[in-house]
Image (cartoon, rainbow, N blue to C red):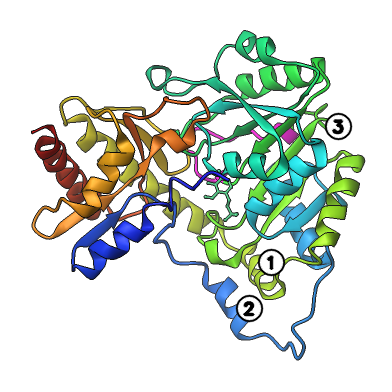
Amino acid sequence: MPESPIRKLVPYAEKARKANKHIYHLNIGQPDIKSPKTAMDAVANHNIDVLAYSRSEGSEEYREKIAAYYHRNDIPVNADEIIVTTGGSEALLFAMGTICDAGDEVIIPEPFYANYNGFATASGVSIIPVISKIEDNFALPPISEFEKLITPKTKAILICNPGNPTGYLYSKDEIKTLAEIVKKHDLFLVADEVYREFAYDGLEHYSILQEADMAQNGIIIDSVSKRYSMCGARIGCLVSKNKEVIATALKFAQARLSPPTFAQIASEAALATPQSYFDAVIEEYKERRDTLIAHLQKIEGVKVGVPKGAFYCIVELPITNSDAFAQWLLEDFDLNGETIMVAPAAGFYSTPGVGQNQVRIAYVLEKESLIKAVEILKAALQQYAN
Ligand SMILES: Cc1ncc(COP(=O)(O)O)c(C=O)c1O
């Protein structure tokens, strides 16, 4: 199993913290936004005597409400086309187990969410990467690049939209192009849409299941973690209109018995969160993005794409080994007792050697902290070069 590039430096961070260094955590997508009060109240005011299992596919009431949420987002999905999972993480694992045998291949534009490497390894699946480039802001690579890689073992194309770690938001045209290719080659299109709400600059997210004839080929991965800043709830779902996919994924769900009961209650209540919550959160993230990018662009030798969604960016630095640099930041560097923690980007690629001069930054801190963090990065780069 590969280590998670997001978490593998935690022991160094712990050591730095014990030495009283203040660390700005840019490494992990843990939002500092409050979880909706309705969700917390639903758990606090429960009248449960026995904390029982729920149904393997998730409680009926919750799935009905998720289906209503999708309908509000023009995604025509019914309750029986949803399997509630223990986070989007488990939905990804179920998806791979459902559509692949050991030795099968899934094509993924890279850089991609690092844990896809772990889920693929655990499922015996090979990731076949298509490189997207920082110069193109990580747009969808030409479709010919995908077609070149399709073999009899290829089962799916997996995308993350909006992207972690790139922040790229696929356009409607790009989704249509992907839909065409999967239908042409009888593959699945698995879309990790856990950041669906986080789209900036007036752009709108376009889901693969908004495409009318993707019923047989489309699988959505979803989660409450980022949408409602409820990462610790551990609730997500797998969605497909393909009955065989749902029937097979349900067997995986039955093997692990049920998703967590209290967290489903919280997640169900969270669905009543008003649009005004999202408007405020999205405005906040947009301002953070603008602040972060503007300050990063002022550092000589630093290259950064402009994220259109989610809350991450890949930053190219004038260094050759971001693993060593990220560790050095924690172990050997501080600016007035403060340092930063970043995620080295090589773990977001599966092509060996790529991404070693890049890090991923999550803009999940307040603007003042982001400005401070970039100041620290600038000073660190100067010292590291000498
Ligand atoms: C793109 C993406 N997919 C899936 C997940 C898994 O999230 P969770 O298991 O918390 O729902 C994450 C978490 O950061 C993510 O960034």
- The residue wearing badge 3 is 216
Q: Which residue lies furthest to the bottom in this view?
A: 49
Is 202 in the magenta?
Answer: yes
> Would you say the magenta stretch is mainly helix, strand or loop?
loop
Q: Can residue 216 be seen in this view?
A: yes
The amino acid pointed to by label 2 is Ala
Q: How far apart are marks 1 and 2 (CA)?
A: 9 Å
Is 309 in the magenta?
Answer: no
Q: How far apart are marks 2 and 3 (CA)?
A: 36 Å
The amino acid pointed to by label 3 is Gln
- The residue wearing badge 2 is 42
* Lower position in the chain sequence, tag 1 or tag 2: 2
Residue 30 or residue 265, whichever sits in front: 30
Residue 372 or residue 6, whichever sits in front: 6
Snapshot quadrant of residue 295:
top left
Q: What stretch is highlighted in magenta?
A: 195-209
